[in-house]
Image: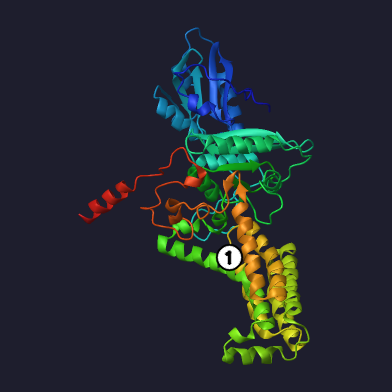
Amino acid sequence: MNSPVNDVKQGSRSPQDPLDPCRRSDDFMISAMTISGMSVEICYYKTLVDSHLLEVVIHSLQERIPSSEELNLHDVLSHIPIEETKVTDQNEEMVKALLQGDLLIRQCDQIQEALLVPMPGKEGVRSDNDTENEFSIIGPKVGFVEALPVNLHLIRMQLRTPNLIVKEMTLGSLSQSKVAILYVDGIAHPENVSRMEERLKGIDFDAVLDTSQLDQLIADNSLTPFPLFTTTERRDRVIFALITGQVAVISEGSPSSITGPSTLFDFFVSPEDYYLPWALGSFFRLIRIFGVIFSLFASALYVALMTFHYEVIPKELLGKLISSRQNVPFPPLVEVIFLETTIEFLREAGARLPNRIGQTLGIVGGIILGQAAVEAALTSNVLIIIVSLSALASFVTPIYKMSNAIRFLRFPIIILAAIWGAFGIAIGLCFLLVHLSRLKSLGSPYMAPFYPIQFRDLKDSLIRASYEQTDTRPSYLRPLSIIRYKPGKIHQANQLDEE
């Protein structure tokens, strides 16, 4: 059944129109129609309203209401078979109802009064939209799906503000994929929004199948292994990015979103950090950072010590290391490359197989291959421990793309360690730091807040300070509103509780 209302974006009617704040978003619709001789406007957010129920309501209005020369909204009210339908002249109530997914009907010549029609069932979305790769231990367990309207619906239901702006466009000469840019007006810097919009419009590509393609096409540097935009399938991570001043992009057919500008430390932040007490959140964040450093340099350090720097190993440990390698016919470099490659084989095979088979293959295959490699004198048991810990540590990052970058960078650092020892590791670290310091995400420094140094933002970087101290948005994003909330009210509430 075709809808009797055509979704048409209309311009602002007058400066006094209470719906002007809503008109800035592409998913807000105002359509004109005639009900028994009365010209009315039907206003709604298409990402919140159930389209089938909308058709039922409109047909009901057209069929039940008799023609009358003096018909008004109160006459229409009595013919709508939905509870809690009402007429209001309060501007704030109109906007609030629209953001809750209600239908707003008003006469074209009396825009200060409107009929609000609740839309029951408007929150119905796919029930199995749990996150697949970003598991939530504490907090919401809502993830995106492949349908763009559903994803926009999920975000709108959490951010009930007319300042949430959605800009839609079509990309891909063959796929004609719909892409939506989201930001919060009054918080996100206009330059970040325009830069994201210009880069997306400048894409000349045949088929856009996932936001991961957009991530690469709009990146500031296409030669880096590091992800320059945060890719996530979690709704709460996207909402946190929006309220801090970032810009989000969601593509049709993709169950994930990208947000930017991003920094290196955004990839070590998990939403659970903010659901736990600040001390625990800071502890787990430091664990992630230490785990990535260990994963990046542990195997290379083993190669450097066993090849060039025996003298720095304690005597008690040196004897065990020598005895574990006395039957291994290969140099440390070949030994490490063999084990690292084996781990990558197991990891890739486990990722491509069904879940139960993949988990069994990873556990059983790792145990059997590790034991067989030691018994065959292909590697030492000490190195198996180091490589296994490195593989585990590479998964501590909440964002999978950063885990891939760490896995890739281990190999060149291992080769440098085999050539120059600890000096080679130092060279690799220097090149890595220089490369990171030169990277930008949507024009913003990738190493912020450490380069350039911004002391105010350090309270939510390596550690997460308490909510009483994280009342400002990151300054590197240049938000139009730097204050998120007033911690003074928290102090006053605590003092009242103590009294």
Q: Which of 174 and 150 is in front in this view?
A: 174
| Vertical comparison of 153 with 385: above or below | above
Q: Where is residue 142 in the image (x, y as percent from the top left)?
A: 55, 51
- Residue at horizontal 62 percent and vertical 89 percent from the top: 318
Counting other residues with Cα less than 10 Å from the Cα at mark 1, is it few (<14), some (14-19), or many (20 or more)? many
Q: In this rendering, would 114 be left or right of 444?
A: left
Left or right, 110 with respect to 4, comes to left
Instruction: Please give left or right for residue 470 compared with residue 352 in the image.
Output: left
Q: In this view, does 345 lie above or below 173?
A: below
Tell me the residue that label 1 is attached to.
396
Quarter where residue 148 is shown: top right
Query: Which of 357/392 is in front?
Result: 392
Classify mark 1: helix, strand or loop.
Answer: loop
* Residue projecting furthest to the top: 69
Residue drawn at point x = 69 percent, y = 74 percent: 420
Query: Is residue 277 visible from the viewing direction of this image?
Result: no
Say above or below: 417 vs 106.
below
Q: From where the camera sits, is residue 117 visible? A: yes
